[in-house]
């Protein structure tokens, strides 16, 4: 399981976020998603810790805490929704080439 950390400063780094959570236990991984087009941080991240007890301690201590001029939103991350079959997958017969083209 991982922890969602929202309302992050755009100046945050993996190292600084890891250091904050390390006060509550062992940090296994930190992810800071970036915008595909600009490469800028998106203002949230995910932290994985060694045990569920460490995660709970970090959430209890850091949710609502001010850090880098912002009030953090910290809670258990929700599983990612499956976006696989929500329309758009099939082109429904549009744009196929006609069958009567001479290829030779």
Image (spheres, rainbow, N blue to C red):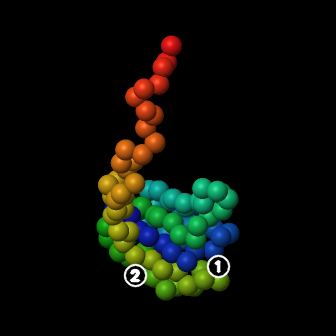
> Dot 1 surroundings within 10 Å: few (below 14), some, or many (20 or more)?
few
Q: Which residue is drawn at 47% across and 56% down?
A: 29
User: For the N terminus, which image quadrant?
Assistant: bottom left
Question: Depth check: 36 or 4 in front?
Answer: 36
The residue positioned farthest toward the top in the image shown: 104
Q: Which residue is drawn at 55% across and 77% down?
A: 7
Percent coordinates x, y for residue 2 in the rendering: 38, 64
The residue positioned farthest toward the front in the image shown: 100
Q: Which of marks 2 and 1 is nearer the N terminus?
A: 2
Residue 62 visible to the viewer? no
> Dot 2 surroundings within 10 Å: few (below 14), some, or many (20 or more)?
few
Q: In this view, does 11 lie to the left or right of 77?
A: right
Question: Residue 68 has which mark?
Answer: 1
Q: In which quarter of the image is residue 43?
A: bottom right
Q: Is residue 32 left or right of residue 97?
A: right
Q: In which quarter of the image is residue 34?
A: bottom right
Percent coordinates x, y for residue 71 in the rendering: 55, 84
Taking 11 as reference, is 28 above or below it? above
Percent coordinates x, y for residue 25 in the rendering: 43, 66
Percent coordinates x, y for residue 56 in the rendering: 35, 74
| Residue labelled with disc 2 | 60
């Amino acid at each position: 399981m991982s922890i969602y950390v929202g309302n992050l400063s755009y100046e945050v780094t993996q190292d600084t976020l890891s250091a904050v959570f390390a006060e509550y236990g062992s940090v296994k991984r930190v992810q800071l998603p970036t915008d595909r087009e600009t490469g800028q941080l998106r203002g949230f991240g995910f932290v994985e810790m060694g045990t569920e007890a460490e995660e709970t301690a970090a959430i209890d201590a850091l949710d609502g805490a001010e850090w880098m001029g912002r009030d953090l939103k910290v809670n258990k991350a929700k599983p990612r929704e499956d976006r696989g079959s929500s329309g758009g997958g099939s082109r429904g017969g549009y744009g196929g080439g006609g069958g009567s083209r001479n290829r030779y």
